[in-house]
Image (cartoon, rainbow, N blue to C red):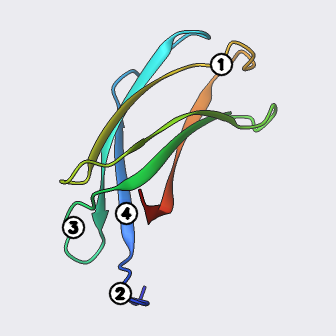
Amino acid sequence: PPIVNGARPTAIMATPVDVAGFRGEPVRVQGKVVTMDTHEGVRGIRVELYIRPLDHVGGTFFLGNTVTRPDGTFEMAAELPRDAPLGEHGGVLDVVLRHE
């Protein structure tokens, strides 16, 4: 994608620290937001974490958010919702396109 108004396309790379969890317990994730062209870390970007059932029944649940460090890295821990349906869920990370 082209650079528009000085904004450069970014990519988010994440690794779950906890690959399984139970309702009411925390799960942890860590990662990095980088520019796609130079792979430099991007500081001050808000990252939001959601989960949704793999069968797409039951909706998406917001777990929490954090802001990237000066080197673009982030980590967060968030409690799994007690009202989330039982079963397998996938994690969804979203980058808010403005600096905090």
Select label 1 or label 2 by which is in front: 2
Instruction: Give percent across and percent down for residue 34.
Output: 28, 62
Q: Which mark is residue 52?
A: none
Q: Which mark is residue 39?
A: 3
Q: Give above or below for 4 relative to 97.
A: below
Name, please, the residue furthest toward the front. Answer: 100
First in sequence: mark 2 vs mark 3? 2
First in sequence: mark 4 vs mark 3? 4
Amino acid type of the residue that numbered disc 3 sits on in the rendered structure: His
* CB atoms of marks 4 and 2 within 8 Å: no
Circle 4 residue? 11
Could you tell me which residue is drawn at 30 percent across and 42 percent down? Answer: 74
Circle 2 residue? 6
Instruction: Give percent across and percent down for residue 1.
Output: 43, 85
Q: Secondary structure at mark 4?
A: strand
Compare residues 84 and 72 and report the one nearer the observer: 72
Circle 1 residue? 81
